Amino acid sequence: MYVTRRLRKDGSTYYGPYFPGNLAHRMVHFIHRHFLVPSCKVDLTRYHPKPCLQYHIHRCLGPCVEGLTTDDAYAHAAQDVRLFLEGRHSDLAAGLRKRMQLASDEMRFEEATGLRDLLASEDPQDKATVSTVEAFTATARSQPGDALRHARGTLAYAGALGISHENLRWAWPLAARAASELGDDDAARELLALVDSCRPGHLAPMQRAERDLVRARLAAANGDPTAAVLRRRRDQPARGQHALPPGPRPARPRRAPESHGRR
């Protein structure tokens, strides 16, 4: 499992696209840390003599070396990754609970503990990453209701991570656009209250721009002339600049061709 910018007809399964690119890297980092699938491009059709560092730091099952894992364990890990990337988290949680109970009944307590930790991860950064990926997936599928719900799930960690955290920098605009598409003014006001409670210097430029758009939409919906004033001010030229009248631009004077001589 790795990030790529090129699609090839090589039989592999591709997911995405994800924007921004850093979100894809963070998601793949989360997958490697929790699902232990390989992060390299090693040939898995044959065995290799020894594992790499990722296996020794417990970030890979080591399917490239004979005896380190089983085909069933690697197949389960690959299936879990597919369910996670496809947004089927209820199916993923049900499968993890079933395997955790089976491992406990067979006294494979180490495996059961690992599945329990994966199922009950309390790291706010991990949960925010998962919610952000779900919000992007719902947006790509034109599901504004789900996009708003998942983006709100990310924004719930604003107190722990801060409004300027990368996941929240993308979750707030996603939530604002979904609320606008749904016509949910109450959700838009809640989102404004969240960013207004933060210091202005802590907001990313995109968050500030989306905040102004949300305010303008609410003002226009309520018949407030402030929206028209904001629009007119944006259209006015800045100080020291002069607006050109409509029509074709004046032609530039042509320069005389330069002559070159030979010596």
Image: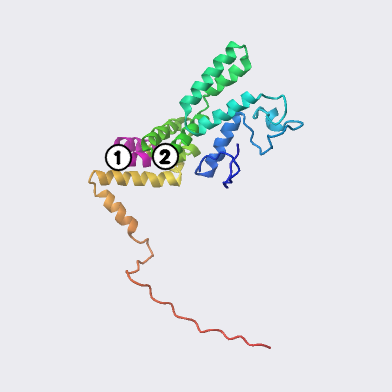
Placement of 246 over or under 254, stated as above or below:
above
Q: Nearer the viewer, residue 191 or 13?
A: 13
- Name the mark nearer the viewer: 1 or 2: 2
Image coordinates of residue 60 in percent, x first then y, are: 65, 29
Name the quadrant of the N terminus: top right
- Badge 1: few (under 14), some or many (20 or more) residues near its Cα, within 10 Å? some
Dot 2, crowdedness within 10 Å: few (<14), some or many (≥20)?
A: few
Q: Position of 113 compared to 53: left or right?
A: left
Q: Residue at x 53, y 32 (%)?
A: 82
79 sits to left or right of 71: left
Is any atom of residue 260 visible in this view? Answer: yes
Name which quarter of the figure residue 195 lies in: top left
Tag of residue 191: none
Q: Quadrant of residue 68?
A: top right
Report the predominant secondary structure element of the magenta stretch.
helix
Q: Amino acid at mark 2?
A: Arg
| Residue at 60 percent of width and 27 percent of height | 75
Question: In the rendered image of this protein, does residue 31 appear above or below residue 72?
Answer: below
Identify the residue at image location x=51%, y=30%. Answer: 83
Q: In the image, which residues are magenta?
A: 176-194
Dot 1: element: loop
Q: Earlier in the sequence, mark 1 or mark 2?
A: 2
For residue 139: magenta? Answer: no
The residue labelled by disc 2 is 141
Q: Give the Cα distance between marks 1 and 2.
A: 18 Å
According to the picture, the residue beneath numbered tag 1 turns out to be 183
Residue 152 at x, y percent in the picture = 40, 33
